[in-house]
Amino acid sequence: MDPVDPNALLEKLVAIPSASGSEQAICEYLVAFLAGQGISAQRQGDNVSFELGSPDPKAQRLLLLSHLDTVPACAGWSGEATKPWWAGDRLFGLGANDAKGCVTAMVLAALALRDRAATLGIRCVFAFVCGEEVGGKGIQELLPVLGHLDAAVVGEPTGLTVITAQRGMLILRCTARGTAAHVAHAHLGENAVHKAARDITRLDALRFEPHLLLGEARAQVTVVTGGATKNQVPDLCEFFVDVRSTPNLDHATLTAQVAAELESDVEVFSDRYRAVATEPSETVVRAALAAAGTQGGTGSATTSDWAYLAHLPAVKAGPGDTHRSHRPDEWLSRGELKAGKAFYENLILNYAAMASKADIHG
């Protein structure tokens, strides 16, 4: 097999458009590429997975997960977003940073360990999924197929900072109810918009218990709709509240706390993105920190497919910078890709050694 040019692989993946819902072509390419490298990958829908490692069926299984889809190209790009170009050390193109750099680095790490994978003492499950940007369709489809897992690494652009806590997302629909009346006889009615306005002011002042790594969650009103006509006291006003939750406050507690403060009716509109955190003592955290050469993890404000892995010890880390994501001219450098590959490779080796030591000592 010919050596793989890391930069060329990244460029090829970026050159294949894969906005959410259109991941078919990149799946086909990745399966064929891996086959050419002697790795048999499975495709379930628009998700690609493969496994390397110990032949022992009882060996611990470490999931390395990232996503193939991108957001649609926004305005403001210097060139065509799906026709990547190099400028010095940087590859510009849609998905270069979020998250095809992570996918490429994970694939390169797998290739580096391929020939000695059977001696690692663990099994590494690599999964590259669709639909992460639009609700986590891919990971939800794939998880039942993957079987038992012991820990996970979620590939997102973090500058190789090890993320051990991630915010969730709770969206509440609030409905203020009043009584309609002619504006000229407003005293006969009850203004639902005014009621909603009082509640919105209360939400701005509402405080929640802070999290050690993530800080405080805040309730943000995002959409307000009320009133039917300009000469009628409105009897209904609806507004949505977005709370980027923290692991110390479950969504039921947050919902109850908001509802206790408001005059409006409160119901959960969406709570599928749960906040997650992993204890520093977990093997995957220690392995990731050693690979990164740092002492402690940090928190992340952005959600990811980690929200669907709350049952597993997990970390989030990868090459790139979260602040480049979903913006024009996103990029990844050659140096970042090289460092990402080394990080994932060392994380796997560290996890294998730590898991083996744990087994020896009971």
Image: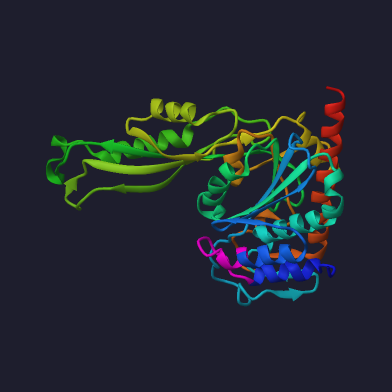
Q: Where is residue 281 in the image (x, y as percent from the top left)?
A: 77, 28
Horizontal side of residue 52 vs 94, given as left or right: right
Confirm whether the magenta stretch covers residue 103: no
Q: What is the quadrant of residue 355 in the picture?
A: top right
In the image, what residue occupies the spot 81% across and 57% down? 111
Horizontal side of residue 342 vs 175, given as left or right: right
Dominant SS of magenta comes to loop
Q: Position of residue 278 (x, y in %)?
A: 69, 33
Q: Is residue 94 above or below residue 54?
A: below
Q: Is residue 219 above or below residue 281?
A: below
Which range of residues does the magenta coloring cover?
16-27
* Residue 350 visible in the current orientation: yes
Which is nearer the eye, 2 or 4? Answer: 2
Q: In this view, does 279 lie above or below 330?
A: above
In the image, what residue occupies the spot 37% across and 35% down? 267
- Quarter holding the N terminus is bottom right
* Residue 170 visible in the current orientation: no
Q: Where is residue 45 in the image (x, y as percent from the top left)?
A: 54, 57
- Quarter holding the C terminus is top right
Horizontal side of residue 82 vs 9, given as left or right: left
Please give the count of numbered marks on the rendered protein.
Answer: 0
In the image, what residue occupies the spot 35% across and 38% down? 174
